[in-house]
Amino acid sequence: MSAEPADAVARGAAQVRADLERLVRIPSVAFPGFPPEPVAEAAAVTAEILRDAGLTGAELIDIPGAPPAVWGELAGPDGAPTVLLYAHYDVQPAGDEAAWTSPSWQPAERGGRLYGRGTADDKAGIALHAGTLRAFGGAPPIHVKVIVEGEEETGRGTFASYLAAHPEQFAADVVVVADAGNWRVGEPTLTTSLRGLAVLDVEVRTLRAPVHSGLFGGAAPDALIALARMLATLHDPAGNVAVEGLVRQAWDGRPVDQDALRASAGVPAGVGLMGDGALAERLYTRPSITAIGLDAPPVEGAANALVDHARARLSARLAPGQDPAAAIAALSAHLRRVAPWGAALELTPREAAPGALLAGGGPGEAAALRALEGAYGKAPVKVGSGGAIPLCVLLAQALPAAEIILWGAADDAAQIHAADESVDLADLEHATLAQVLLLEELGRR
Ligand SMILES: [Zn+2]
């Protein structure tokens, strides 16, 4: 590897950071109920940043029913392959501002990390795509397409449908999805396995209306207790998922360290982990089921009455090979089987997304691993991701010939979706260099 790409990336690092800070100041939350103006502003600023980096034709494309996407193309030498660079400019809401050490929409540096909503997920992706183009002086050795969408976090998938309907526009030999990162700061990582997602609401009704617990308790069934009994059957005593029909797979990538996991998840001493067997399998290739919401009378002001109905939202993470519809069916059948006292159930499926095994083991992946090694100066590892990235699955379906490289500048301390989200500034530069090296190698083919 020549020293040139590293120098070019180092020279551009201040601009990458400036671009990122500019984007982080825009509260581009695309969720319903949030103002649309910052979303539109983030789209316009993204296009401006990319144009400034050399993507001269960057423009907004109208996505019916969704915020605009930012799109541009740059022709490389004749016969060169095509790479599609993906990121998203929308972010999660900031949540409780009091939980942030510094204001959520004001980028602030502490200890080599830049803090603020979207610093990692995924405005870093935009900044490093721009930094990649800039390092080539606007003349990359390969055809480049860039797409930055504006509703990834909402899970609505309008953009994903648009992409699926226009496969020729997005056709590429390699797709680089800069919406992930390193398993730990400074440890080059390629994400090759994604879990799927299936969300199901379960409502239990045992009575026409609440009734006096003194008159009827002991005989008339209580919906909250019924629901609690059902939820308790979803796992075995060790905490492994105990629902028949959910797929489990083996994992042969990097193992997960228990102490590191406990620390990053914030599990207090004395509290055990759920499940048994390899931690990486529990996190990447086996299902998990979590109760993420519960509707029942609040404790404050609770009457001495039997609860007539109660509702829970169950969120299941699925092994990469599991069909989410089959998972919903398996979970529904389980809940019907265990409902006590003939309680009436209403089951309402919510979001569902399949997982994916991204690693084709092809030349793009090999080039990506070499690029990581060159950029970080150490051997990279492959990891799985427990979180769903539906877009990657859709890309794999819509562009079956493309290899998907999922990486980025985040790490296990990035606190994405939470307070004090941050990105490591050195890894932002490493990640930019890795993309430069990847494009360079692909261009030599
Ligand atoms: Zn993201």
Image (tube, rainbow, N blue to C red):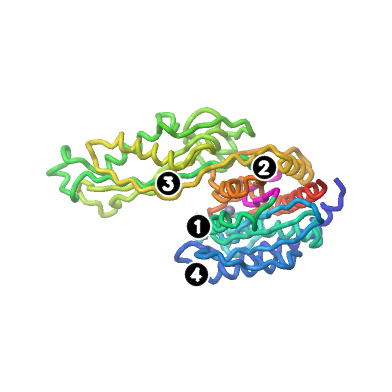
Looking at this rendering, what residue extends furthest in the left direction? 215
Which amino acid is tagged 4? Pro
Q: Position of residue 75 (x, y in %)?
A: 76, 60
Query: Which residue in the structure is indicated by mark 3?
Result: 199
Q: Are marks 1 and 3 in contact (CB under 8 Å)?
A: no
SS of the residue under disc 3: strand
Q: Is 363 left or right of 383, judged from the image as shown? A: right
**First along the sequence among labels 1 and 4:** 4
**First along the sequence among labels 2 and 3:** 2
Mark 3 vs ligand 1: CB under 8 Å? no
Q: Are marks 1 and 2 in contact (CB under 8 Å)?
A: no
Q: Is residue 170 above or below residue 217?
A: below
How far apart marks 1 and 3 lie (CA) works out to 14 Å
Q: Is 70 left or right of 434, judged from the image as shown? A: left
The residue range painted magenta reads 173-190
**First along the sequence among labels 4 and 2:** 4
Query: Which residue in the structure is indicated by mark 4?
Result: 35
Mark identifier at residue 95:
none
Q: Quadrant of residue 262?
A: top right
Which amino acid is tagged 1? Thr
Residue nearest the viewer, comparing 322 with 408: 322
Q: Is 141 left or right of 280, judged from the image as shown? A: right
Which label lies toward us, 1 or 4? 1
- Using a 10 Å C-alpha cutoff, classify the residue at mark 4 as few (fewer than 14 neighbours), some (14 to 19) or many (20 or more): few
Which amino acid is tagged 3? Val
Q: Is 418 left or right of 430, judged from the image as shown? A: left
**First along the sequence among labels 1 and 3:** 1
How far apart marks 2 and 3 lie (CA) works out to 27 Å
Query: Which residue in the structure is indicated by mark 1?
Result: 154
Find out whether residue 272 is within the magenta segment: no
- Using a 10 Å C-alpha cutoff, classify the residue at mark 2 as few (fewer than 14 neighbours), some (14 to 19) or many (20 or more): many
Mark identifier at residue 190:
2
